[in-house]
Image (cartoon, rainbow, N blue to C red):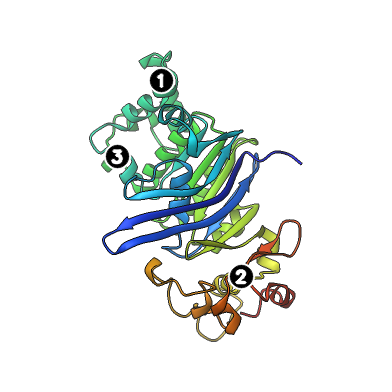
Amino acid sequence: MTEPLLDVRNLTVSFATDEGLITAVEDVSFTVGKGEILGLVGESGCGKSVTSLAVMRLIPMPPGRIESGQAVFKGRDLLKLAPADMRRIRGNEISMIFQEPMAALSPLQRVGQQLVEALQLHDDRLSNKAAWEMAAEWLDQVRINDPRERMYAYPYQLSGGQQQRVMIAMAMMQDPDLIIADEPTTALDVTIQAQVFKLIREMRHEKTAILLITHDMGVIWEMCDSVMVMYASKIVEKGTRPELFDRPAHPYTRGLLASIPRLARKTGKLYSIPGQVPSPFEYPSGCHFRDRCPHAFDRCAREEPRPVELTDTHRAACFIADQLVEKGPGAK
């Protein structure tokens, strides 16, 4: 079996707040293989972004704290590396595309200056002229019109789609082994979203893996090879894309799939999962999803469900996973 590019094991992240300690990510484990696109999907507030920030060592500490776990990347545990070693990996071997490009780009520097700085940070042998030319070429590759002119623009002078294309160029130009894309198209309209995802697919080198974080199951279907479903700090289901869409085995996954609008659906209201993701201060005992689950029974309140192995690649943390998987995707 090929060794995974990234192997996250039993990751738990907490935050100290005025009201007490909360657990944002609990016992999360997953692997990403070379060239794989792995989707991490779930509602807002379930811990997706915290998971990615912990892997990148970007959790502010304090108030955050990595309680336990490992993030083994190419044989090195990122959570134990010296800060200087981690800085060399960020942007070079692992790049990140953030949800809000205006929060990641400096409003005080021209786009070209920021791209040149990123290039020279990882290769101090590059002259200003060479770095400037390379940055302009990358803006051209990500389909920005008049790239050399845009090099002189400030971020606020670009549209949201152009800003995100700059972030994609910044992420791709070091030829990283892993790209973490955290809701990269949330602020963009549907047409621009499709263009950005098409661009990411085209720009990705065969060996480059992507961890794609989203709340949109449509994006998961279009982009991903494998999928993890996260709810209230925990991974509740993992599998290949066909397994998750054709044989969902956790009630939360089934609810997400039932919520997708379908043109063939002629009558009736759109389905929505009742309730909302609970506050970390109010996670229910046992299964965190039980208060919203149509299949909950007494055991769900008493015990925490452990992952059930349905196939070599498909697991779901539900006491009746083996029954639900046989029903297919239609029933909630």
Q: The N terminus lies in which quarter of the figure?
A: top right
In percent of width and height, residue 250 lies at 62, 71
Task: Compare marks 1 and 2 and give the one earlier in the sequence.
Answer: 1
Q: Report crowding for label 1: few under 14, some 14 to 19, many 20 or more residues within 10 A (C-alpha).
A: many
Real-space CA distance between mark 1 and mark 2, rounded to the nearest whole angstrom: 53 Å
Q: CA distance from mark 3 to mark 1?
A: 19 Å
Residue extending farthest to the bottom is 268
* Rendering coords of residue 141 (x, y %): 49, 33
Tag 2 residue = 305
Question: What residue would you read off at disc 1?
Answer: 131
- What amino acid is labelled 1 in the image? Ala
Q: CB under 8 Å between callouts 3 and 1?
A: no
Chain-order first, disc 3 or disc 1: 1
Q: Residue at x 28, y 64 (%)?
A: 19
**Which is more toward the observer, 111 or 237?**
237
**Which dot, 1 or 2, sits closer to the camera?**
2
Q: Amino acid at mark 3?
A: Pro
Query: What residue is rendered at 25% in x and 38% in y?
Result: 107
**Mark 2: which amino acid?**
Pro
Q: Secondary structure at mark 2?
A: loop
Disc 1, disc 2: CB below 8 Å? no
Q: How many residues crowd mark 2 within 10 Å: few (<14), some (14–19), many (20+)? A: some
- The residue wearing badge 3 is 155
- Res 291 label: none
The answer to which image quadrant residue 275 occupies is bottom left
Q: Is residue 46 left or right of residue 305?
A: left
